[in-house]
Image (cartoon, rainbow, N blue to C red):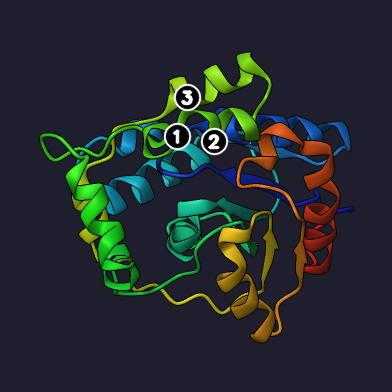
Amino acid sequence: MVSAPATTVLVHSPYLGPASLRPLADALTALGHPVLLPDLRVTVNAAPVHQRLIGGFADAVEESPVDGDLVLVGHSGAGPLLPAFADALEIPVTGLVFLDADLPAPGRSWRDDAPADRMAHLKSISRDGLMPRWDRWFAPEALSAMVPDVRLLEEIVGEEAEVPLAFLKEPRPTVAWTGPCAYLRLSESYRTPFATARDLGWPVRELDSHHLAAAADPTTVVGPLTELVTELGAL
């Protein structure tokens, strides 16, 4: 009996929604790869955000009609949670791919490793304990330059959540992952975790693009992503 190919589970950033990865999901599907794109937005609107995200992810995946093993692909702020996501599942996970994402930092919060002025800025623009939607962290033209498709950008922005500021102070889960990992860098901002992944001997790829390339230019991203998934032995 031929085993079913692994399903690629695309995990969106806590600050965004599934629209930020849906074009990439469509590109994978067009190549014949089974894909799951859970919607985790409902889990990020109250603390403890990490705990709610993990529980919501496990429920979404376990209730979906997946067949065979999984490979988890985490974008941006979803990266540090990939080991905990894998640990929460009954379905076997064969590998983790960090897509322009932060790496796991067990027991440490985002605030522990972020520049003090960055944390101060986010605190200053928060209201009633909630951070503003992600697009409001930047000048308006920054996002439109990354995603020129107006309708797609409107969909991405419309899905953004107001995440509690407490999320940045919550210690990340202390879950060990001993399986294979890979890294795909899209933007300049993630050169440091990319270099760490490369130094650890992980399979890596890099593109000179931007953080939302999976939405705006999925045909460019899907090639190196499928190469990495193949290297992990998941397809």
Q: Position of residue 116 (x, y in %)?
A: 25, 66
Q: Write the residue at 45% across / 53% down.
A: 77
| Residue 70 seen in this snapshot | yes
Kindly identify which residue carries mark 2.
142
- Horizontal side, residue 209 vs residue 150: left or right: right
Q: Write the residue at 41% across / 29% down.
A: 160
Front position among marks 2 and 3: 2
Contact between marks 1 and 3 (CB within 8 A): the answer is: no
Kindly identify which residue carries mark 1.
139
Q: Which mark is residue 19?
A: none
- Horizontal side, residue 113 vs residue 210: left or right: left
Quadrant where the image shows the C terminus: bottom right
Three-letter code for the amino acid on which mark 1 is drawn: Ala
| Label 2 Cα crowd, 10 Å radius (few <14 / some 14-19 / many 20+) | few
Three-letter code for the amino acid on which mark 3 is drawn: Val
Q: Position of residue 149 (x, y in %)?
A: 68, 20
Q: Write the residue at 77% across / 54% down.
A: 225
Three-letter code for the amino acid on which mark 2 is drawn: Ala
Kindly identify which residue carries mark 3.
157
Q: Say what secondary structure mark 1 lies in.
A: loop
Contact between marks 2 and 1 (CB within 8 A): the answer is: yes
Front position among marks 1 and 3: 1
Is 91 rendered above or below residue 139? Answer: below
| Residue 48 seen in this snapshot | no
Q: Say what secondary structure mark 2 lies in.
A: helix
Q: Nearer the viewer, residue 20 or 228?
A: 20
Sequence-earlier tag: 2 or 3: 2
